[in-house]
Image: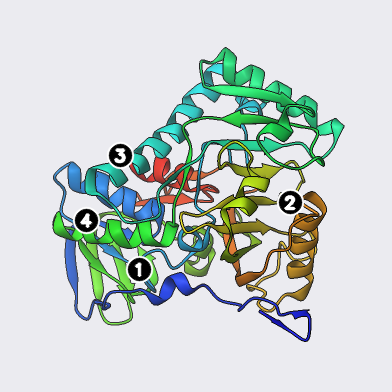
């Protein structure tokens, strides 16, 4: 909106969350075979897998399914997130890298299969991913990534500084690598839709039911005690709040903006050939894609506030940083952003996911620091 030629900043909230079904909290004691704590991508995937195996499953969520990092995300469903295939190759070797990559791409396909099998309404947008180089120095890492992808049998393409403009309509990038068979979703809508599907399959789901303490085979809520043979804790960055993995799980803050509905010719100038999901090679990277409504999602972060202890609302610095970034890449465009919000994700020291059993309490299992929705689903399914 403009007034006296001034562009007003976007509203500092996500309107996705306004569309919610009535909440059902747990108000009594409960006994089950498997208890899943956390209603994001990882928790819902774990509940789905245990239910498919014939287990009696209950899931509790402190707010509502998709209220955390899963629902606030930009919805990039692509195997390459914080770590690339080449990163895994450098750390563990090609055989282990392929096993890890297959698990993550399995998460991609699990999300796609759920959307298609259950006709989930979650703004499913098939869009390949392109990682673009901000400088020439970054090109070598992208070349190495493309080489590993092709060597291990994955679909990929490398673009130099001349061909990249065919796919991303900016002259400021020096090249890129493309990942095929990826897509975008509304992560919040996906979680809410999967909640409905799982309830229909017999999974008991209780929202607005925070767990305040966890012991072996026992979880304490505000209004009762849940006993279970197995407890799967999928609360991402909130694990230290339960006194668990306090030295293993950290957090990072990122920001996401949503634009007004763009005219088709504006979208065409950003993506001349077809719509893609894009992020760059900055250490704290920037990323953007177009939704099914024709809105631009633009996200990123900064070293200045990545480790803030709380979400930083009304952050003028990040609003200016992101809008300036996009204007520098697409100087001919003037885009008004309508919504803007921060989010915190869980991370480990080495940026890799954490999954496995507690070393002392054999009924407890963790899924955390799964940066990237397909990684969270892959971990939950595993």
Secondary structure of the residue carrying tag 4 is: helix
Q: Which mark is residue 61?
A: 1
Image coords of residue 32 (percent x, y) = 17, 60
Image coords of residue 282 (percent x, y) = 77, 45
Q: What residue do we see at 76% from left, 51% from top?
A: 330
Secondary structure of the residue carrying tag 2 is: loop
The reply to whether callout 2 and callout 1 are in contact (CB within 8 Å) is no
Image coords of residue 238 (percent x, y) = 50, 65
Q: Which mark is residue 308?
A: none
Apparent side of residue 375 relative to residue 8 in the rendered image (left or right):
left
Judge the density around disc 4: few (<14), some (14-19), many (≥20) Cα neighbours within 10 Å.
Answer: some
Looking at the image, tell me whether mark 2 or mark 4 is earlier in sequence order: 4
Q: Which residue is mark 3?
A: 113
Looking at the image, tell me whether mark 2 or mark 1 is earlier in sequence order: 1
Q: What residue do we see at 46% from left, 32% from top?
A: 181
* Label 2 – label 1 distance at C-alpha: 30 Å
Image coords of residue 344 (percent x, y) = 59, 63
Q: Which residue is mark 4?
A: 197
């Amino acid at each position: 909106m403009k007034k006296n030629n001034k562009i007003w900043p976007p509203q500092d909230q996500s309107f996705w969350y306004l569309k919610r079904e009535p909440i059902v909290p747990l108000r009594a004691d409960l006994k089950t075979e498997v208890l899943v704590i956390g209603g994001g991508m990882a928790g819902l995937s774990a509940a789905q897998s245990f239910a498919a195996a014939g287990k009696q499953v209950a899931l509790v969520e402190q707010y509502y399914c998709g209220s955390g990092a899963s629902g606030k995300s930009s919805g990039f469903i692509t195997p390459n997130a914080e770590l690339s295939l080449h990163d895994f190759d450098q750390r563990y070797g090609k055989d282990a890298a392929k096993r890890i990559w297959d698990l993550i791409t399995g998460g991609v396909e699990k999300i796609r299969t759920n959307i298609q099998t259950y006709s989930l309404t979650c703004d499913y947008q098939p869009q390949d991913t392109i990682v673009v180089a901000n400088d020439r120095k970054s090109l070598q890492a992208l070349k190495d990534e493309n080489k590993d992808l092709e060597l291990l049998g994955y679909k990929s393409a490398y673009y130099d500084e001349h061909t990249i403009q065919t796919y991303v309509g900016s002259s400021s990038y020096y090249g890129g690598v493309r990942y095929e068979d990826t897509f975008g979703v509304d992560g919040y809508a996906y979680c809410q839709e999967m909640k409905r599907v799982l309830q229909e399959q017999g999974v008991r789901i209780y929202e607005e039911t925070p767990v305040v303490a966890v012991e072996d085979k026992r979880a304490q809520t505000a209004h009762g005690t849940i006993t279970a043979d197995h407890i799967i804790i999928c609360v991402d960055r909130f694990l230290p709040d339960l006194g668990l993995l306090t030295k293993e799980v950290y957090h990072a803050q990122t920001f996401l903006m949503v634009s007004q509905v763009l005219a088709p010719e504006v979208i065409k100038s950003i993506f001349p050939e077809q719509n893609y999901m894009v992020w760059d090679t900055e250490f704290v990277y920037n990323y953007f894609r177009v939704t099914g409504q024709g809105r631009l999602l633009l996200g990123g972060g900064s070293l200045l506030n990545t480790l803030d202890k709380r979400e930083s609302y009304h952050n003028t610095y990040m609003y200016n940083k992101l809008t300036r970034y996009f204007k520098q890449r697409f100087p001919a465009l003037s885009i008004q952003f309508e919504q803007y919000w921060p989010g915190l994700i869980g991370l480990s020291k080495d940026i890799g996911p954490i999954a496995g059993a507690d070393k002392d309490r054999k009924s407890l299992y963790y899924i955390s620091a799964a940066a990237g929705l397909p990684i969270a689903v892959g971990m939950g399914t595993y």
